[in-house]
Image (spheres, helix red, strand yellow):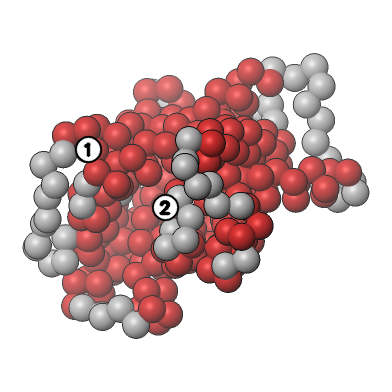
Amino acid sequence: MIRAYIVAVLTEFIFGFSFIFTKGALDHITPHQLLAFRFITAALVLTLLRALRVIKIDLKNRPLGRVLLLALFQPVLYFILETTGINLTTASEAGLMIALIPVFVTLLAALFLKEIPSPLQAASILTSVFGVGFIVLGGGRLSTSGHTLGLVALLGAVLSAAIFTILSRWLSQQFRPVELTFVMMWAGAIFFGGLAFFEAQNRLTPTPILALLQQREVWTAVLYLGLLSSVVAFFGMNYFIAKIGAARSAVFANLSTIVSVAAGIGLRGEPFHWYHLVGGVLILLGVAGTNRFRPRAQS
């Protein structure tokens, strides 16, 4: 169990730093191109590891349709909806909406997995959400876009992430984490690769792929996002969801907010404010409380 918690923390550290690399790459390529490069890299690496027998993946005569459903929600639908929502809304709105993932996971886990949180666990989850809200609101300053479609897209991303967590927990009884990750990466590679290709064909002057990858910000982002944020982090996510449950695992996602803020301050010279500290403490208290208190006993 301790190993699962260590994996959860390390996974969110990886996701937290991914924002730094993503920001740099998006100055040179489109979001769909970056997602295509990311998942193609991840899929090829996992395929190579499978060919070298470093990892074992056996999908023959297995209920593969269930795993494809998992991959539909994460990464396909989640990243489409998140990208759309972020483009149409403000950073405050996007941060607040994404922070609601643990709440939706808790509700769905109680409904479908019978993982009923205790009152103290529920309070801890909300404390973590408030912590994220405190950071993204800047201590009370909310900027709004008034774009309903963007908010609906973000809500769809939240639901996709929550459904993925429930499905991952359910499928952990039938598949190993590496098998789920393998299918997810190939689904992302095929979908976003096709989307990026279609996008390029509709441009008047498409940029050659090799020219894009010659940009340092692009290839470093592709390597980080493809190897760490996809292969390692998604495997870690499937692993700790299987070990500690849906609701307890979902709240760890808010740790990435602390990491991304710290990375922005340390690596990009972004300013540090008092609400970063207060929000970070609330997030840590929420994560600790969710995993410290026992869930409600089933009657």
Specify the quadrant of the image occupied by residue 77.
Answer: top left
Can you see residue 256?
yes
Neighbour class for label 2 at 10 Å: few (<14), some, many (≥20)? many
Q: Which numbered disc, 2 or 1, marks the residue closer to the eye?
A: 1
Give the left or right position of residue 282, taking residue 113 as reference.
left
Residue 130 location (% of width, % of height): 21, 55
Residue drawn at x 30%, y 78% is: 270
On the rendered image, what quadrant is the C terminus found in? top left
- Disc 1 residue type (three-letter): Leu
Q: Residue at x 37, y 55 (%)?
A: 254
Which of the 4 image quarters holds residue 214?
A: bottom right
Q: State whether residue 264 is above or below residue 212.
A: below
Q: Which secondary structure lies at badge 1?
A: helix
| Residue reaching furthest to the right | 52
Measured along the vertical axis of the image, is residue 25 above or below residue 185? below
Point 41% across, 32% down: residue: 160
Residue sitting nearer the eye, 54 or 89: 89
The answer to whether any part of residue 188 appears in the image is: no
Of residues 114 and 112, the one nearer the viewer is 112
The residue that label 2 is drawn on is 253
Residue 199 position within the rendered picture, expressed as x and y whole percent measured from the top left: 49, 37
179 w.r.t. 220: above or below: above
Measured as percent of width and height from the top left, residue 269 is found at 34, 82
Of labels 2 and 1, earlier in sequence is: 1
Q: Which of 166/212 is in front?
A: 212
Amino acid identity at mark 2: Ala
Residue holding disc 1: 151
